[in-house]
Image (tube, rainbow, N blue to C red):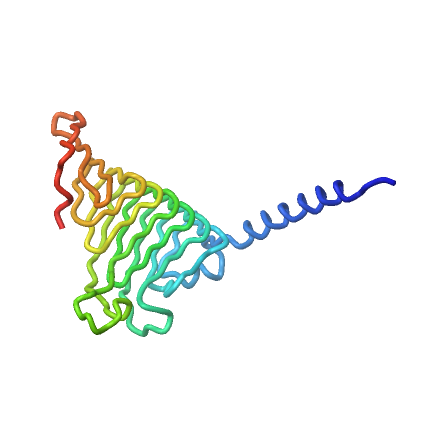
């Protein structure tokens, strides 16, 4: 007797994958989509890939021209969708950026990402954290201060890096994968580690200088 299970399974497999690719294509957020219209700015040629993880308070999120954001992204401004007063430009992403899958960017005051910035996957950026000074209150209920974050144009942030509140990253910086960055990073530098340290920098003569292994952590 002819066993049709294997051919049928192959057919169903192809059909399911074809259908999912169509769903992803239709679900992408592009400038002419209804969700894009809720953003503060959604530039021409920009795309937010489907499926999304979450978008909170899109009116305070500004996405530049030709910027691509990968699947399962979380983009959030404020503490939740019911917050009445929001920073007008809480999250700003420049032009021609490429932000990898599963990124999380949560802004409460200001996160600014320059032009031509690339993120690997699973990058986390936030301008707020929790306090812990009162031992009688759960840490999750203690809100810390908000400290703006800026990432300069031309910067590359590697897979799984975390950019913490109060960080200012210069232009054309490399942030190594898995790094935890807090503080000021100069232009044309390579940083890495937990906590992140300066590894290389561009000297005035145009050469790249390796920083000593015991270099201090970044200036807070």
Residue 125 x, y percent position in the rendering: 30, 53
Q: Residue at coordinates 67% horizontally, 45% vertically from top-left?
A: 13
Q: Nearer the viewer, residue 86 or 3?
A: 3
Residue 133 x, y percent position in the rendering: 17, 67
List the single residue furthest toward the front: 135
Splitting the image into 4 quarters, where does residue 217 fall? top left
Residue 194 x, y percent position in the rendering: 24, 44
Q: Nearer the viewer, residue 44 or 55?
A: 55
Q: Residue at coordinates 27% horizontally, 40% vertically from top-left?
A: 175
List the single residue furthest toward the right: 1
Query: Horizontally, is 3 left or right of 15 in the view?
Result: right
Residue 66 appears in the picture as rendered: no
Residue 60 x, y percent position in the rendering: 33, 63
Q: Residue at coordinates 21% horizontally, 43% vertically from top-left?
A: 196
Q: Quadrant of the N terminus?
A: top right
Residue 210 appears in the picture as rendered: yes
Q: Nearer the viewer, residue 26 or 121?
A: 121
Q: Is residue 156 above or below residue 183?
A: above
Q: Is residue 102 above or below residue 109?
A: above
Q: Is residue 126 above or below residue 7?
A: below
How many labels, in total?
A: 0
Splitting the image into 4 quarters, where does residue 36 fall? bottom left
């Amino acid at each position: 007797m002819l066993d049709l299970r294997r051919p049928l399974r192959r057919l169903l497999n192809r059909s399911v994958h074809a259908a999912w690719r169509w769903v992803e294509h239709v679900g992408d957020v592009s400038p002419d989509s209804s969700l894009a219209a809720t953003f503060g700015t959604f530039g021409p040629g920009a795309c937010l890939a489907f499926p999304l993880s979450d978008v909170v308070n899109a009116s305070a999120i500004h996405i530049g021209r030709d910027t691509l954001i990968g699947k399962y992204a979380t983009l959030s401004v404020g503490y939740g969708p019911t917050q009445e007063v929001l920073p007008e430009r809480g999250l700003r992403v420049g032009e021609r950026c490429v932000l990898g899958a599963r990124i999380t960017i949560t802004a409460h005051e200001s996160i600014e990402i320059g032009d031509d910035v690339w993120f690997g996957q699973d990058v986390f950026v936030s301008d707020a954290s929790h306090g812990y000074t009162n031992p009688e209150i759960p840490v999750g209920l203690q809100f810390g201060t908000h400290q703006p974050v800026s990432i300069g144009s031309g910067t590359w942030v590697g897979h799984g890096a975390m950019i913490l509140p109060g960080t200012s990253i210069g232009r054309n910086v490399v942030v190594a994968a898995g790094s935890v960055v807090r503080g000021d990073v100069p232009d044309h530098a390579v940083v890495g580690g937990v906590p992140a340290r300066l590894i290389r920098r561009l000297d005035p003569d145009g050469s790249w200088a390796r920083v000593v292994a015991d270099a201090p952590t970044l200036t807070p």
